[in-house]
Image (tube, rainbow, N blue to C red):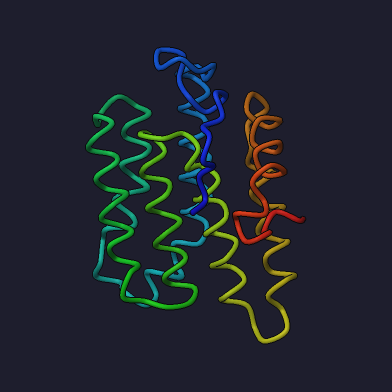
Amino acid sequence: MILPKVRDPRFVTIRRGGTLTDADHHLLALWAASCAEHVLGLFEAVRPADPRPRQAIEGARAWVRGELRMMEARATGGHAMGAARELRGAARHAAYAAGQAGVVAHVAAHELGAAAYAIKAARAAAPKGGAEAAGRRECRWQREQLPAEIRELVLDDQRLRNGVCWSVFGC
């Protein structure tokens, strides 16, 4: 489980009693979608005819644009995670990354799940002996994509939840 037992109010929208603005929630969703898309090819190489992970990434972006309701975006994430279940390795992790990106519309804290699974996908796809280096490269790439408005929030979240996210954020 990558979500904390006690919800961090920084990842709860203002209208639900937290401190997260809609604008920052949207930025978290877009960043998560970028993280997932960066490794999506690892899934599509194994299952090119299965559109569910790509649809989840597109669903997250459509939610940000106001073209998809939260529950619809959440459903695309669930379908992407369904695509992951019967797979192993990089393809599985890439599909889970897409699923996590899709559900950020519902729970903003899933942003870290998309990033963590993307790093796991990069590690799993690396040649023998190169997993750690591949994971660090992916982590650094993700950090380069962070918008300034949410950078410190995400980096702090990585520090706080690194232990429950397979310690992938040590880059």
Query: Where is residue 51 drawn, in percent x and y?
Result: 26, 60
Measuring 46% from the left and 70% from the top, which residue is drawn there? 42
Residue 19: image quadrant is top right
Above or below: residue 114 compared with residue 45: above
Indicate the position of residue 56 as horizontal and vertical percent values. Answer: 32, 49
Q: Position of residue 110 (x, y in %)?
A: 47, 43
Q: Quadrant of residue 59?
A: top left
Q: Is residue 114 left or right of residue 57?
A: right
Pick the residue in front: 92 or 147.
92
Q: Residue at x 37, y 47 (%)?
A: 57
Check the image and name the residue furthest to the bottom.
128
Q: Compared with residue 151, is residue 99 higher up or lower down, i.e. above or below? A: below
Measured as percent of width and height from the top left, residue 170 is found at: 76, 56
The answer to which quarter of the image holds residue 104 is top left
Q: Is residue 9 above or below residue 42?
A: above
In front: 162, or 149? 162
Q: How many marks?
A: 0
Where is the C terminus found, in terms of image quarters? bottom right
Residue 9 vertical placement versus 166 (above, below): above
Between 9 and 110, the residue placed more toward the observer is: 9
Q: Is residue 144 left or right of residue 63?
A: right
Is 51 positioned to the left or the right of 140 in the image?
left
